[in-house]
Image (cartoon, helix red, strand yellow):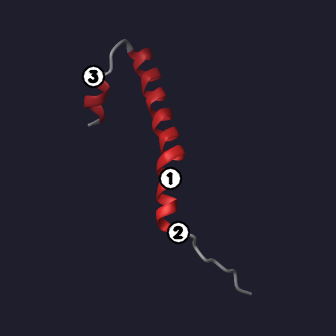
Amino acid sequence: MYGALWRILPGPLWLRIVLVLVLVVAVLFALVTWVFPWVDSLLGPQEGTVGP
């Protein structure tokens, strides 16, 4: 699957590397900004105590 994605990216090698880095940063930004907070709201608060 990653090979197919690599083949459809346009340009020379350096441009493909830059595009992959931009895509990875965009996906991580979307996860941290929208997906993880949404999942956290579904899970609810966790009660945790530390015993002696």
From mark 3 to mark 1, how far is it between C-alphas? Answer: 29 Å
Mark 2 and mark 3 lie on one chain; the one further toward the N terminus is: 3
Give amino acid for label 2.
Gly
**Is 34 left, or right, of 11 in this rendering?**
right
Res. 10 image quadrant: top left
Q: Mark 2 packing: few (<14 Cα in 10 Å), some, or many (20+)?
A: few
Q: Which residue is mark 3?
A: 8
Give amino acid for label 3.
Ile
Q: Which of the two discs, 2 and 3, sits closer to the camera?
A: 2
Towards the viewer: 45 or 8: 45
In the image, farthest residue toward the top: 12
Q: Which residue occupies 61% across, 77% down?
A: 47
Q: Which of the two discs, 2 and 1, sits closer to the camera?
A: 2
Towards the viewer: 5 or 33: 33
Q: Which residue occupies 43% across, 16% down?
A: 15
Q: Do the residues bearing badges 2 and 3 touch, measured as CB atoms within 8 Å?
A: no
Helix, strand or loop at disc 2? loop
Question: Looking at the figure, which quarter contains the N terminus?
Answer: top left
Measuring from the top left, give residue 3's x and y in whole percent.
Answer: 28, 31
Helix, strand or loop at disc 1? helix
Residue 44: image tag: 2
Give amino acid for label 1.
Phe
Question: Looking at the figure, which quarter contains the C terminus?
Answer: bottom right
Residue 36: image tag: 1
Mark 3 and mark 1 lie on one chain; the one further toward the N terminus is: 3
Q: Is 52 rendered above or below residue 2?
A: below
Q: Mark 1 packing: few (<14 Cα in 10 Å), some, or many (20+)?
A: few
Measuring from the top left, give residue 6's x and y in whole percent.
Answer: 31, 26
Mark 2 and mark 1 lie on one chain; the one further toward the N terminus is: 1
